[in-house]
Amino acid sequence: MASDENVLERRLAHAASHASRVRIVLTREIAEAIDEMEILFPHEAVLNAPMGCEHVCVYTSSAPASLIDERIREHRREVEHLPAF
């Protein structure tokens, strides 16, 4: 059982290290987000993808594609559930 716990802890730590490599930000805040990520991850390229709304997905070259996709899907689900004004 202890080895199962260690594997889970390693997976959680691995996921957490990549989580900060993917951010959903407002389009007007993209320059600031890129600057911050370039400081945090100086040896990685910082990329971005428009999302078809007022937000942009900003991520590093080391971020797993599955995590980028997951974050974008989460954001779209959240946006769909917002009340219209």
Image: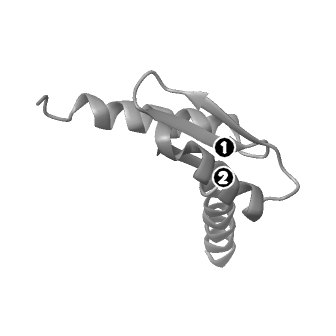
Q: Residue at x 49, y 26 (%)?
A: 51
**Amino acid type for the residue under numbered disc 1:** Tyr
Q: Where the C terminus falls, by quadrant?
A: top left
Secondary structure beneath dot 1 equals: strand
Front residue of 69/41: it is 41
Quarter of the N terminus within the rendering: bottom right
Percent across and percent down for residue 20 are 61, 58
Picture quadrant of residue 8: bottom right
Q: Are marks 1 and 2 in contact (CB under 8 Å)?
A: yes
Q: Circle 1 is placed at which residue position?
A: 59
Mark 2: amino acid = Arg
Whether residue 82 sits left or right of residue 13 in the image: it is: left
Label for residue 22?
A: none
Q: Exactly how many numbered labels are in the figure?
A: 2
**Where residue 68 sits in the image (x, y, percent)?**
60, 37
Please name the residue that numbered disc 2 is placed on: 21
